[in-house]
Amino acid sequence: MSALVTADELADLLARGEVKVLDVQYNLRGTPGPELYAAAHLPGAAHLDLDTALAGPPGVRGRHPLPDPAVLEQALRRCGVDDDDEVVVYDQATSLASGRAWWVLRWAGHPQVRVLDGGLAAWRAADLPVTADVPTPAPGTLTVRPGSVPLLDAGGAAEMARQGVLLDARAAERYRGETEPIDKVAGHVPGSVNLPMADLLAPDGRFLPPDEVRRRAAAAGVHRDTPVGTSCGSGVTAAQLALALHTAGIDAIPYVGSWSEWIEDPSRPVERGDHRV
């Protein structure tokens, strides 16, 4: 089964009562996710907050480290999620936050999760209804089982850059270290290769077709049986990139701490400029 679902497919699943939908609208800067949710969301969708449920507090493990399993479990139960539920997650359009939710739920032992491709924008483009009404789901029973999919720590990311391909999903100028609007040091993990996440999205926020994702990944050095990791600024876009690659049949392991964790240890080397495949 594809990790993605279209707006029309989701509407059909909802009409049959076969899925639970979670709203994970999010902005790193700008209108906060809870406010976006309050303004408009899919009928029946509960809000799952990225900063407080899908990540732990920022610190030496980066700006968006793994969440505490107990905190994540409580948040998912408040959303009414049970162990046997099929879940669909969505954000505004680009699957940035929903990609993080997709990966975290799988890490938590809940593989029955898909992403609404194109998010709320695609839902609206299909002339489907939105609401500001907040549902009150019955408490769920989901049990979080952390570690159900692999992840990279700093040492694993460095090794992936040497032995496989560590893809950096940030914009090219951030990767090269020419600018750094968020983190305190500019640059990238030595040996990592730039594949900007924006290059894998259509103008409307949907993912490019699988063949095109594979072509662009190949240009970055990803070939058959290549071990692949993903990185970004704080681990959110790394998960989005892992999802994009997954749609093309490429398994990738996110470096959850990403650049914001890497630079917390001044002994770790910093590379700037381009790294050629």
Image (tube, rainbow, N blue to C red):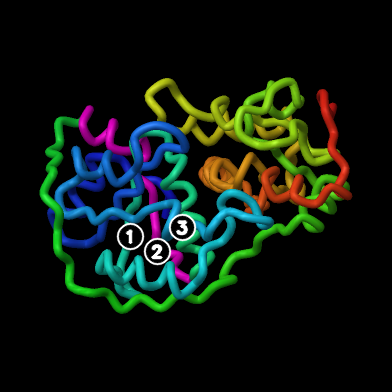
Q: Quadrant of the image for the N terminus?
A: bottom left
- Name the disc covering residue 54, or none: 3
Residue drawn at 49 percent across, 69 percent down: 108
Left or right for 260, reference 98: right
The picture quadrant where one finds residue 72 is bottom left
Instruction: Say which residue appears at 21% left-offset and 31% top-offset.
Output: 124
Q: Which residues are magenta?
A: 109-125
Of marks 3 and 1, the one in the foreground: 3
The CA span between labels 3 and 2 is 17 Å
Q: Earlier in the sequence, mark 3 or mark 1?
A: 3
Left or right: where 249 falls relative to 163: left
Q: Which is more toward the observer, 65 or 10?
A: 65
Q: Mark 2 and mark 1: span between their CA atoms?
A: 6 Å
Q: What amino acid is found at the position of numbered circle 2 in the picture? A: Gln
Q: Amino acid at mark 3?
A: Leu
Query: Is 2 placed above or below 57 here?
Result: above
Which residue bears the numbered disc 1? Answer: 87
Report whether residue 206 is seen: no
In terms of secondary structure, where does tag 3 sit?
loop
121 within the magenta span: yes
Identify the mark at residue 187; answer none if there is no mark: none
Query: Is residue 150 placed above or below 247 in the rendered structure?
Result: below
Labels 2 & 1 near each other (Cβ < 8 A): yes
**Lower position in the chain sequence, tag 2 or tag 1:** 1
Residue drawn at the location 35% of the way across and 40% of the way down? 32
Q: Earlier in the sequence, mark 3 or mark 2?
A: 3
